[in-house]
Image (cartoon, rainbow, N blue to C red):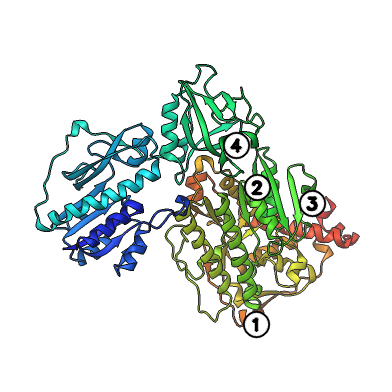
């Protein structure tokens, strides 16, 4: 009989092997990807299928239209499910003329739903069992084919009971499968009034409530002990795992619930009776006996265990910014420190843009390189709450001249940081740029739906886009499969004071507006690459920083797993139009008389300016729906205002550095200067 099997975990593995031994022609196995958080102690269904040459699949949704058609094409007669964690819908069930059968680790109709093995132990049951039944619209509610009862021993825990149920599952299937193959499987309706439905258990359900009887607490310990997440309690703020415990017979009725009655052995008073912790573990310690645990943690009689103590001092959110000296990092740090809820840890190659930040009591800076100071980076990822890796090579001339260096820094070094965030469970806020979508032709680039398009391989300029885009996808995958909390943001052509420096423009590693201002300051022609027809949406840096602050703030966790375009779609202009507006503002500026005459415009081909590997797009206009709807952010500052602010900052800084003084004759002619 051609059969599709859905299976997972130890019981799924034993059941799959029984199905193969019983002569079923298993044409495909569907399973779940093994979860590293579960410790990997159980047998792998995927490996068993592979060893028998059976195709194995692990889709997120088995009832997706694509998988529905693929399963239909398998022409299987029977579907069997063994501890598969997802419900099988009616469209899938309709594909199997011989029926759809499930194996459940309890005596139905009792203990329908999730985690029946853990629940029966936690509830102190003395027996459980295995039920094989036909599937129905409601979970675990179909007609029963066969059942086996299993006694629960007083020393059984979740693992030992799982192994016994696995063996019993294989045994009952070897009886049931011949009945299914012959079409003679019996059907007994479940008595609905006897049904109980159990919900999913989480690690938080392991908290020991000492006001309960000692027998109940002992049952909880054995229900969730290793390799499950474990039962736990707290001594103040210190978490203590309890791996094995026993009820103290004839314990005196003294002591408040949670009070330590003895440290050797480690005995705790309960609502009724007392519990001895036989084996346990401190948060940073090793598995040990209860007596050693008490000694290591200095647990003394009359101390109280219980829920985690609430710290009296308010904990600020700590933000790690790698590349803190850049224009985003420095200005974001200032914004964060305006709010007393934050402290900032930062690293960069130097600190010339940080100003008075370095003396702020909640700002902690170290000079370093993420490619060299990896231990410092990992330590601070572990220490901080929110991580912003802003380190990147982000100028077109570098993409073309040093593509491998761009890949090594922008992708490889940042990937280390991403993996550290996964390892230590930290929230990651990662910058793409508006260039990650490359040559997308959508009028408005949408965070959720617009395609990401890059140019030919020999156009080295796209290695930046490809690196950023791939890392975005890796982050997304870590979020979906490993629970990484993340937000991605894409800054669209931010302009304003303190973007970079005129010195950086001299070597071709600045923003476009800085390069244009350098031309005005030095009296050299403004170079319009390919005529300056490329259109951009310019965004006031202060508004961009405010949007980024709200993403970090993350009210009601609305930013988790989301992508944000941070740009002003109403401020679209070509590079040529930007240059013309800048020249107009320059001519009006009070310091204009300090500088040479305007040298005009000069058109230049991009290959001449950047090199042979350059290519560009004609427009980058963002949709900002996510920022508007999720965090209430809408930019309002017009481009001409940002241009004037940017120009004024650069000219004032340049004049101070070079001791420029406006000639008296010029000052007399210029009303703005006279004022």
Q: Position of residue 100 (x, y in %)?
A: 19, 53
Report the side of 440 relative to 114 (left or right): right
**Which residue corresponds to mark 3?**
355
- Which residue has dot 4 on it? 293
Where is mark 1, residue-wise?
608
Count how many numbered circles sit on residues in the image.
4
As rendered, which of 494 and 37 lies closer to the eye? 37
Q: Which label number is shown at residue 221?
A: none
Query: Element type at marker 3?
Result: helix
Disc 4 is placed on an element classified as helix
Q: CA distance from mark 1 to mark 3?
A: 38 Å
Q: Earlier in the sequence, mark 1 or mark 4?
A: 4
Q: Earlier in the sequence, mark 2 or mark 1?
A: 2
Report, in whole angstroms, how far the alpha carbon at label 2 lies from the one at label 4.
Answer: 26 Å
Determine whether label 3 and label 2 are within 8 Å by CB: no
Q: Earlier in the sequence, mark 3 or mark 2?
A: 3
């Amino acid at each position: 009989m051609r059969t599709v099997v859905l299976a997972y975990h130890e019981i799924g593995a034993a059941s799959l092997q029984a199905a193969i031994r019983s002569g079923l022609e298993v044409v495909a196995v569907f399973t779940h990807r093994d979860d590293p958080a579960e410790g990997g102690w159980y047998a792998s269904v995927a490996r068993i299928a592979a060893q028998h040459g059976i195709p194995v699949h692990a889709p997120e949704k088995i009832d997706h239209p694509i998988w529905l058609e693929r399963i239909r094409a398998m022409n299987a007669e029977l579907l069997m499910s063994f501890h598969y964690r997802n419900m099988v819908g009616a469209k899938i069930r309709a594909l199997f003329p011989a029926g759809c059968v499930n194996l459940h680790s309890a005596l139905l109709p009792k203990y329908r739903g999730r985690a029946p093995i853990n629940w029966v132990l936690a509830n102190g049951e003395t027996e459980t069992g295995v039920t094989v039944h036909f599937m129905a619209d409601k979970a675990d509610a179909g007609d029963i084919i066969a059942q086996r009862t299993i006694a629960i021993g007083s020393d059984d825990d979740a693992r030992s009971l799982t192994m016994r149920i696995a063996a019993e599952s294989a045994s009952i299937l070897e009886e049931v499968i011949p009945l299914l193959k012959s079409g003679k499987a019996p059907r007994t309706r479940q008595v609905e009034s006897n049904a109980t439905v159990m919900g999913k258990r989480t690690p938080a359900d392991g908290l020991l409530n000492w006001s309960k009887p000692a027998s109940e607490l002992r049952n909880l310990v054995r229900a969730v002990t290793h390799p499950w997440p474990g039962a736990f309690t707290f001594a103040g703020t210190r978490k203590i795992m309890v791996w094995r415990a026993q009820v103290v017979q004839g314990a005196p009725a003294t002591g408040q619930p949670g009070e330590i009655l003895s440290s050797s052995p480690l005995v705790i008073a309960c609502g009724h009776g007392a519990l001895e912790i036989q084996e346990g573990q401190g948060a940073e310690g090793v598995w040990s006996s209860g007596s050693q645990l008490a000694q290591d943690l200095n647990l003394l009689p009359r101390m109280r265990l219980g829920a985690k103590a609430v710290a009296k001092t308010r904990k600020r959110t700590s933000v790690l910014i790698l590349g803190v000296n850049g224009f985003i990092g420095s200005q974001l740090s200032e914004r964060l420190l305006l709010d007393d809820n934050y402290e900032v840890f930062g690293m960069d190659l130097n600190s010339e843009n940080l100003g008075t930040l370095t003396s702020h009591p909640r700002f902690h800076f170290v000079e370093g390189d993420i490619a060299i100071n990896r231990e410092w980076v990992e330590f601070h990822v572990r220490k901080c709450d929110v991580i912003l890796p802003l380190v990147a090579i982000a100028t077109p001339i570098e993409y073309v001249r040093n593509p491998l260096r761009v890949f090594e820094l922008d992708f490889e070094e940042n990937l280390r940081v991403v993996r550290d965030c996964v390892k230590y469970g930290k929230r990651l806020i990662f910058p793409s740029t508006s260039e990650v979508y490359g040559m997308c032709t959508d009028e408005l680039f949408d965070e959720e739906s617009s395609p990401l398009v890059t140019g030919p391989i020999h156009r080295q300029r796209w290695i930046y886009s490809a690196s950023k885009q791939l890392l975005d996808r890796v982050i997304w995958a870590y979020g979906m499969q490993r629970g990484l909390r993340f937000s991605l943001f894409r800054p669209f052509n931010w302009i304003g004071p303190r973007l970079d420096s005129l010195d950086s423009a001299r070597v071709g590693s600045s923003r476009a507006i800085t390069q244009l201002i350098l031309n005005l300051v030095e009296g050299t022609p403004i170079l319009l690459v390919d005529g300056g027809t490329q259109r951009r949406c310019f965004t006031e840096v202060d508004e961009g920083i405010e949007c980024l602050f709200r993403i970090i703030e993350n009210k009601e966790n609305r930013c988790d797993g989301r992508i944000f375009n941070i740009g002003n779609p109403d401020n679209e202009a070509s590079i040529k139009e930007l240059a013309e507006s800048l020249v107009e503002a320059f001519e009006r500026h009070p310091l204009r008389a300090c500088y040479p005459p305007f040298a005009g415009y000069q058109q230049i081909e991009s290959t001449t300016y950047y090199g042979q590997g350059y290519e560009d797009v004609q427009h980058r206009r963002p949709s900002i729906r996510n920022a508007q709807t999720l965090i209430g952010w809408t930019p309002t500052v017009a481009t001409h205002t940002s241009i004037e602010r940017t120009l004024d900052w650069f000219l004032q800084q340049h004049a101070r550095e070079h001791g420029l003084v406006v000639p008296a004759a010029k000052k007399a002619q210029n009303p703005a200067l006279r004022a």
